[in-house]
Amino acid sequence: MSLRIAIMQPTYLPWVGYFDLMDRVDAFVLLDNVQFEKQSWQQRNRIRTAKELEWLSLPILNSGHSGQLIVETRTSGLQFVAKHLKTIAMNYGRSAFFKDEFPVFEQRFKGAAASGGLADLNIGLIRWLAERLGIATPLHISSQMPCNGKRSELLVDICRHLGAGEYLSPVGSAEYLREDRHLFDTATIQVRLHGYEHPVYRQVYPPFMPFATALDLLFNEGPRALEILRSGRRDSILL
């Protein structure tokens, strides 16, 4: 039986839709051997504060590293670790499940950040969040796979390597996937777009603001997080 897979860059503390995509496939590939993009989701995400959604951005070594891949990218020192943890604690300390989740999160954050590698940090946090949400989809790392090509060529090669007959993609990639549709057709790989509507749940500060990191859902809803995450699921769309 062919597999349904999804392929996503390892972003920093992703939103809930990222994990719903992971939950809907047989295998999830973390695409770390593509170019790093400054000020992208690769290095930042948002938390809910008393006033608004606030960015948490990772300091990155850029000088002399033009064109570097995500897997080659390094953070600029480790001073940000204490700062980010303090900011998260200050804004989520009153959430219902903060005391249950934060101590282990803090340790995993420090461990994932220790090497100084951006991919190590992001992938470590993604693994932890998936575990805490109760998502058991096998994770693969593209830089550790014998796959090549650019853009959709690489995606198709990864699909072939894993024996996938269906590729589930975020809606935001629809335009370039339509341009490259022939590559998937030639490989007999069906392309579908992920259908998802952000669920509403309790937050420490009203009114509800969507599109924060999935930490927001976990700290506020704890054991109900996966049920709530799945409630936003909509039918996938055939490309």
Image: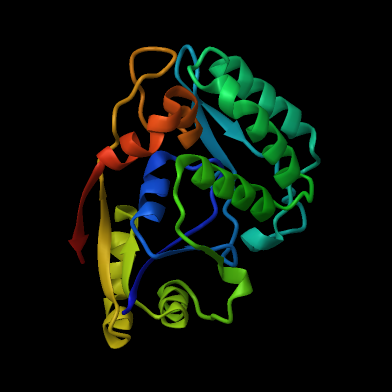
User: Is residue 200 shown above or below 90?
Assistant: below
- Residue 73 image position (x, y, % from top left): 70, 56
- Name the residue at the bottom extreme: 186
Quarter of image, res 189: bottom left
- Residue 217 image position (x, y, % from top left): 43, 30
Left or right placement of residue 70 versus residue 22 in this view: right
Q: Residue, x 45% and y 58% (percent of image)?
A: 137
- Residue 191 image position (x, y, % from top left): 27, 70
Q: Residue, x 45% and y 78% (percent of image)?
A: 162
Q: Quadrant of the C terminus?
A: bottom left
Q: Residue, x 46% and y 36% (percent of image)?
A: 214
Q: Residue, x 26% and y 40% (percent of image)?
A: 232
Q: Nearer the viewer, residue 165 or 178?
A: 165
Left or right placement of residue 165 versus residue 40 in this view: left
- Residue 144 image position (x, y, % from top left): 63, 72
User: Is residue 42 shown above or below 53?
Assistant: below
Counting every numbered tag in the picture gives 0
Q: Nearer the viewer, residue 63 or 142?
A: 142
User: Is residue 30 shown above or below 158?
Assistant: above
User: Is residue 218 shown above or below 59?
Assistant: above
Left or right placement of residue 20 versus residue 220 in this view: left
Quarter of image, res 146: bottom right
Q: Nearer the viewer, residue 2 or 196?
A: 2
Q: Quadrant of the N terminus?
A: bottom left
Q: How is the image coloured?
A: rainbow
